[in-house]
Amino acid sequence: MTTLLEGKDILRTDTLTDEELDVILSTAARFEAQLEDEGRLDNMAGQVMAAMFFEPSTRTRLSFESAMHRLGGDVITIADPKTSSAAKGESMADAVKVVQGYADVIVMRHPRKGSAAEAAAAVSIPVINGGDGAGQHPTQALLDTYTIKKEKGTLDGLTVALAGDLKNGRTVHSLVYLLARFDVRLIFVSPAQLKMPGHITEDLVDQGVDVTETDDLAAAMRESDVVYMTRIQKERFDDPEEYERLKGSYVLDMPMVEQAKDGITIMHPLPRVNEIKEEVDAYAGAAYFRQAHNGVPVRMALLALVTGRE
Ligand code: NCD
């Protein structure tokens, strides 16, 4: 039992301590094993989670809802902002202030960077960031880290390539700060227009992480133990023609897997648009559906830890 995260918000990954990361990963592993044995737990009985999603989602919202159900708790949801009072012009801060009277924990996704922190400042119950625009996506990064550990046994000593839209992809903005805690080498693969924001790369270099930048995915895959593909984030482009030019930048197919480092693990936060050919799904190291499934125990851990029910 630990109260390390009780009452806390989960907004970003760079402010999580190593100890907090350890507790989240070990609690997730415990819940995963308990689920296999018992099917359903009752840690969160009598508690309500509010899912407030002001931007599209399949995995994040449904895996949070599944996590809460599997912990014996209840769920209330805004899945489509058009059906909530956001469509009448209600501010996000007002909406969360109201919802804190209905729930014990809020999971929020919003198109604006910084919105989760604003919500957290407006309420006294824990807020979990389910993605704030092109900002952060800490819960995805936690399940990604959990997945690498599960697939590879350890993170230390690995070379991890992150490929695609590193500029706008919030999952990678969060993930690199968790990977940096381990002895990893990072290769950032993107077209020049979609490079990782300079301030993030600088943070990592300041922390002593070995970071290389390239636009050559095949070359990066020859050196990598894990390749993390991302979608070109269409909704973040001001210029639709720029998106059209860049959308096909990387398409991972079987010939590329065959040329890659032996045993390479292939990840993707999903949804994929055309970054990974379906032919790759049958490859043993294609971990993206297992990765999505890991969202449930990791989100169970987060819900239980911030509400003191772990
Ligand atoms: C990601 C997101 O919403 O940022 N999706 C997810 O939560 N698994 C990735 C994406 O949309 O490309």
Image (cartoon, rainbow, N blue to C red):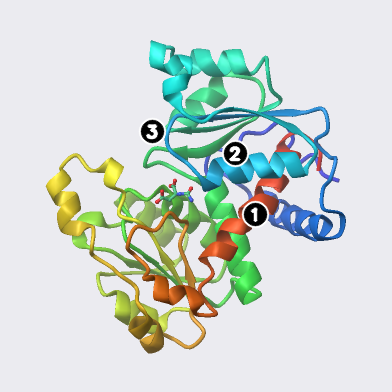
Say whether disc 3 or disc 2 marks the residue closer to the N-terminus.
2
In x, y percent, where is residue 205?
A: 40, 61
At label 1, counting other C-alpha atoms closer than 10 Å, the crowd grade (few under 14, some 14-19, many 20 or more) is few
Which image quarter: residue 196?
A: bottom left
Disc 3 and disc 2 in contact, CB within 8 angstroms: no
Closest to the camera, between mark 1 and mark 2, is 2
Circles 1 and 2 in contact, beta carbons < 8 Å: no
Q: Nearer the viewer, mark 3 or mark 2?
A: 3
Q: Is residue 281 left or right of residue 104?
A: left
Labels 1 and 3: the sequence-earlier one: 1
In the image, what residue type sits under mark 2? Ile
Mark 2 neighbour density, 10 Å: few (under 14) some (14–19) many (20 or more): many
- Residue sitting at x 59%, y 73%: 156
Q: Position of residue 44 (x, y in %)?
A: 80, 35
From the image, tell me which residue sits under label 1. 18
**Is 124 in front, or is 139?**
139
Residue located 59% across and 38% down the image: 10
Residue type of the residue flagged with mark 3 = Pro
The secondary element bearing badge 1 is classed as helix
Q: Which residue is mark 3?
A: 111
Judge by depth and name the residue closer to the eye, 309 or 80.
80
**In this image, 190 relative to 173: left or right?**
left
**Looking at this rendering, what residue extends furthest in the left direction?**
241
Residue name at image x 40 percent, y 70 percent: 278
Q: Secondary structure at mark 2?
A: loop
The residue that label 2 is drawn on is: 10
